[in-house]
Image: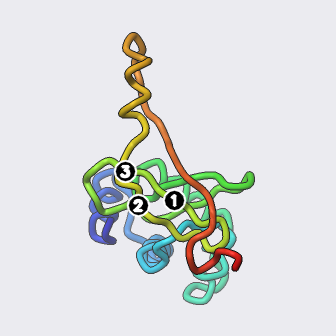
Amino acid sequence: MSIDEAWDILLKYDYKRTKNREILLRFFDDADRYVTAMEVRVAVERDNPGISFDTIYRNLAMFSKLGILDETELNGERLFRMQCATDHHHHHFICTACGGTKSIPICPMDSVTVNLSEYVIEGHKFEIYGRCPKCKVG
């Protein structure tokens, strides 16, 4: 998702264009990986000293709820990244060391739904965790 697309969503729901939100969106546009709220705080404090953790966390939760950020949990901690720009359904490999991701173009639900024909599926999440080529132990 681009920053302009994110702003379109925010303005559609009457959220104001603020300096803090602009800084956060720019950070995620550049990050291209999953990051913790604390990593976000450390990075954005350089551009906006004194930004509160509450402000950051509230915006992360709101961005996630609106579909601007993708959210996952790893080792009991919430991680965030900018929503993918693709319009096709896919999943991710997530590096447990650096938070980097790789798109997985297939979906295991294609085979699972055969056994759930009488059920109404409302959603699913599929992620693979491990170490990327840069982070794997030699």
Is residue 79 placed above or below 108 in the rendered structure? below
Q: Name the quadrant of the C terminus.
A: bottom right
Q: Mark 3 belongs to which amino acid? A: His
How far is mark 1 from mark 2, CA to CA? 6 Å
- Residue at left offset 59%, top offset 66%: 95
Query: Which residue sits furthest right?
Result: 76
Numbered mark located on residue 103 in the image: 2
Q: Residue at x 28, y 53 (%)?
A: 12
Query: Of marks 1 and 2, which one's residue comes earlier in the chain?
Result: 1
Q: Position of residue 20 (x, y in %)?
A: 50, 74
The quarter holding residue 39 reads bottom right
Left or right, 97 with reference to 101: right
- Ranked by sequence position, the earlier of labels 3 and 2 is 3
Q: Position of residue 65 (x, y in %)?
A: 47, 48
Residues at badges 3 and 2 in contact (C-beta under 8 Å)? yes
Q: How is the image coloured?
A: rainbow
Which of the 4 image quarters holds residue 61? bottom right
Looking at this rendering, what residue extends furthest in the top direction? Answer: 118
Q: Do the residues under discs 1 and 2 have CB atoms within 8 angstroms?
A: no
Instruction: Give the camera-side residue of 37 and 85.
Output: 85
Residue matched to label 1? 93
Residue 55 visible within the image: no
